[in-house]
Image (tube, coloured by chain):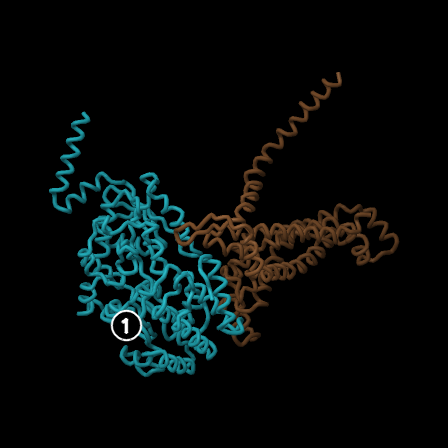
Chain colours: A cyan, B brown
């Protein structure tokens, strides 16, 4: 009996080696786990899989099926770091977890990507271990790979989005104040920060806010820094970040913008009431956040336009990681390949969801004809700009502390803008206090 | 014979200890062990950096020294006390007034049960939900601002969350609203425990209701007042959920509404058990000292 088993197994092994790729996938999957656990922080990836992954059937809100594998979605919102706390408590023990409880896929964002692709932490499988090689990922933008490459040069995640971002402006207001809503003319009025400030003055005179809050422009500045937040364990405030503080203080004092938090009601009012000239964001921003599905929104009427803005930047993006210890490596590999490299699927995503996909060929196709025209941008085709932006994104100044530093810095500076801190130094002192609380190992000036 | 009787007593007393077991087990597991480990942890450097664990390394009193010299511990203590006092004074006055009205037999208030229930109701809402509600109500584009602007009281919407006074005032108002019902019930219990004969004697002597309240009710209410004050003080020192939710955990503007426990909570991000442990021990000492002071001052006359 035992001998027979052995020979069967060796036969299967030999067979596996001979058979073409696709067939192995199915064969191997048969021996793998029956439950695919996916950790996410919102509905985005779930809806992408539901709409675009061949063979996925939704069962209910948090369950689905791929063939005979049950898919479990665990959605933990990012607020208050809850999503990362959840990952931190389960990922280190994932290898030893019971087969059906093992996390197979988890998603990460740019702000904290370095924490989870760290070679020492080793919680995300390398793409090489999964059997995905460089050629498979050749159509992706380089920056999307740089940020998830560990210290040993191993790639540990893959993304379907290229999140180069720009300035999204209200066409009505552009016509009224600037005399034209043509992207070329608008770009001329926001081509650098000095011109931007000048235009902000005109907007304020006409009774409009240039941007909803100072935090809108923050990422544009913070992505164009020359030093990372932390150098040799010491926190450094880059000159460009300081420039954001100075420009923002001037804008707040002149009544050209506010100090509301991003995502607050005060901030998102401009999506509806037409009092805000511009927002800053990448493709997922106008797709996911501007409420195009709500008839009363400006997006639903196609009232926005897209230009590059004062400086190129990126924002966010979602990367798919295979959890170390997964018992569904074949299925995970297929999901990653399908969602982040397959031209047909990615074009579908771009057209159905107005997402800017991480695929040079698809973006080139979309930019070349009218298939990339977006209704919420009044029929404008943003893909050429988005593709050009993605080529230029530079991730070399990211650090594992970015999320905490960005959040705390904006929070501390709000006091300065509101006049509660006497000067910049007092607000900076509060930032330093908060950073040492979050990261006790860091030193501040 | 004597021996035998002693045995019987011991055997009988045994039941006392047996009945104590459930309490002792719960106390040891959920109170004593955490307390001892907190103190133990406070002498170590022990936190997470990303997914990496740093420590535990024994560092002696370094955490305490760091808290007392570098942190803004006194500032957070002051914030906590200011917000507690701002809320406690109106709360105790309101409760005394309501308690006196409810227990005064001459007034014969109708609908007493209804009002007692209503004033207790805010305490049944979760503090976080209550704070969330206030956050929405007092947002810059919220309903309170639009009412005030429409009535012509304000020209511009007032940013309640960006001013020290308004944030602290809102926190105090919420705490007052949530707890005055509870305090009223406690004070009423104390007032009803005062013998009627004393009131009658005072009335016969021609005392006015005001005199009765200050000369009879208040002095006899002192034990209950001390109890209310100490429990409120301990609760006040542990103030967390209301300002945490209202300011989104920042304690802004400029951390003027950050309480001691909110500061403790800040160390949870890096799971900094050492520093958080040291802070907890300091809080314990502080609570003990303050309670002792309140008790001494208010109970001084009772000693005689």
Up-down: is B249 above or below B24?
below
Q: What element carries label 1?
A: loop
According to the picture, the residue beneath numbered tag 1 turns out to be A378
Query: Left or right: B201 with respect to A109?
Result: right
Quadrant in the picture for the N terminus of chain B: top right
Residue located at (27% from left, 79% from top): A184
**Residue A155: image x %, image y %?**
26, 55
Q: Above or below — where is B78 with respect to A326?
A: below
Residue occupying the point 55% across, 40% down: B33
Q: Position of residue A329 (x, y in %)?
A: 25, 45
Q: In this view, does A252 lie to the left or right of A26?
A: right
How many C-alpha atoms fall within 10 Å of the one at disc 1: few (<14), some, or many (≥20)? some
Residue A52 picture location, percent across and down: 24, 54
Specify the subunit that label 1 lies on: A
Q: Is residue A346 visible?
A: yes
Q: Determine which quarter of the picture holds residue A264.
A: bottom left
Residue A371: image x %, image y %?
20, 67
Q: Which residue is drawn at 16% across and 28% down?
A: A4
Q: Nearer the viewer, residue B300 or A51?
A: B300
């Amino acid at each position: 009996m035992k001998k027979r088993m052995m020979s069967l197994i060796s036969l299967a092994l030999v067979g596996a080696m001979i058979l073409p790729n696709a067939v192995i996938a199915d064969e191997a999957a048969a021996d793998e786990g029956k439950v695919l656990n996916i950790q996410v922080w919102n509905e985005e990836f779930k809806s992408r899989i539901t709409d675009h992954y061949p063979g996925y059937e939704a069962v209910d809100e948090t369950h689905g099926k791929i063939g005979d594998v049950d898919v479990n979605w665990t959605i933990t919102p990012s607020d208050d770091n809850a999503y990362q706390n959840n990952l931190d408590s389960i990922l280190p023990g994932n290898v030893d977890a019971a087969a059906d409880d093992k996390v197979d896929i988890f998603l990460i964002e740019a702000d904290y990507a370095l924490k989870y692709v760290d070679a020492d932490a080793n919680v995300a499988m390398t793409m090489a271990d999964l059997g995905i090689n460089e050629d498979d990922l050749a159509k992706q933008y380089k920056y999307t790979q740089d940020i998830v490459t560990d210290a040993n040069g191993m790639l540990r995640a893959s993304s379907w989005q290229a999140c180069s971002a720009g300035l999204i402006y209200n066409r009505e207001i552009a016509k009224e104040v600037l005399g034209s809503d043509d992207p070329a003319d608008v770009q001329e009025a926001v081509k650098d920060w000095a011109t931007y400030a000048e235009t902000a003055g005109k907007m304020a005179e006409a009774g409009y806010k240039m941007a909803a809050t100072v935090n809108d422009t923050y990422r544009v500045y913070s992505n164009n820094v020359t030093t990372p937040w932390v150098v040799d364990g010491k926190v450094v405030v880059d000159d460009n970040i300081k420039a954001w503080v100075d420009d923002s203080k001037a804008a707040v004092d002149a009544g050209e913008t506010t100090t509301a938090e991003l995502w607050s009601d005060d901030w998102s009012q401009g999506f509806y009431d037409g009092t805000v000239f511009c927002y800053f964001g990448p493709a997922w921003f106008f797709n996911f956040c501007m409420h195009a599905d709500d008839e009363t929104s400006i997006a639903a009427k196609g009232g926005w336009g897209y230009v590059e803005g004062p400086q190129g930047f990126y924002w966010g993006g979602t990367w798919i990681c295979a959890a170390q210890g997964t018992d569904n490596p074949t299925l995970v590999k297929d999901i990653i390949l399908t969602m982040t490299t397959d031209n047909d699927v990615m074009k579908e995503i771009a057209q159905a969801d107005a997402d800017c996909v991480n695929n040079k060929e698809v973006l080139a196709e979309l930019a070349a004809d009218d298939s990339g025209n977006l209704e919420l941008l009044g029929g404008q085709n943003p893909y050429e700009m988005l593709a050009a932006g993605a080529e230029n994104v530079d991730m070399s100044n990211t650090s594992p502390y970015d999320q905490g530093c960005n959040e705390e810095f904006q929070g501390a500076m709000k006091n300065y803008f509101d006049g509660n801190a006497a000067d910049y130094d007092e607000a900076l002192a509060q930032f330093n206090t908060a950073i040492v609380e979050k990261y006790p190992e860091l030193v501040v000036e | 014979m004597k021996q035998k009787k002693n045995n019987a007593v011991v055997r009988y007393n045994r039941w006392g200890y047996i009945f104590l077991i459930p309490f002792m087990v719960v106390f040891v597991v959920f109170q004593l062990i955490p307390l001892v480990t907190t103190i133990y942890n406070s002498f170590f450097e022990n936190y997470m950096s990303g997914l990496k664990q740093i420590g535990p390394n024994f560092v002696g009193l370094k955490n305490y020294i760091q808290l007392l010299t570098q942190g803004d511990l006194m500032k957070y203590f002051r914030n906590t006390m200011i917000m507690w006092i701002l809320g406690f004074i109106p709360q105790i006055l309101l409760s005394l007034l309501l308690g006196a009205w409810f227990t005064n037999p001459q007034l014969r208030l109708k609908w007493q049960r209804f009002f007692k229930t209503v004033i207790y109701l805010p305490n049944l809402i979760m503090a976080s939900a209550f704070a969330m509600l206030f956050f929405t109500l007092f947002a810059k584009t919220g309903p309170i601002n639009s009412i005030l602007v429409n009535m012509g009281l304000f020209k511009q919407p007032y940013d309640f969350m960006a001013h020290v006074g308004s944030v602290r005032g809102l926190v105090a108002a919420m705490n007052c609203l949530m707890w005055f019902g509870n305090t009223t019930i406690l004070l009423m219990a104390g007032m009803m425990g005062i013998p009627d004969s004393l009131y009658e004697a005072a009335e016969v002597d021609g005392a006015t209701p005001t005199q009765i309240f200050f000369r009879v009710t208040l002095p006899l209410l002192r034990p209950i007042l001390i109890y209310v004050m100490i429990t409120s003080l301990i609760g006040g020192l542990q103030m967390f959920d209301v300002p945490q939710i209202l300011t989104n955990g920042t304690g802004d503007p400029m951390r003027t509404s950050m309480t001691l426990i909110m500061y403790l909570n800040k160390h949870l991000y890096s799971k900094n058990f050492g520093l958080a442990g040291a802070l907890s021990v300091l809080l314990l000492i502080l609570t003990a000292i303050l309670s002792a002071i309140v008790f001494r001052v208010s109970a001084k006359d009772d000693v005689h």
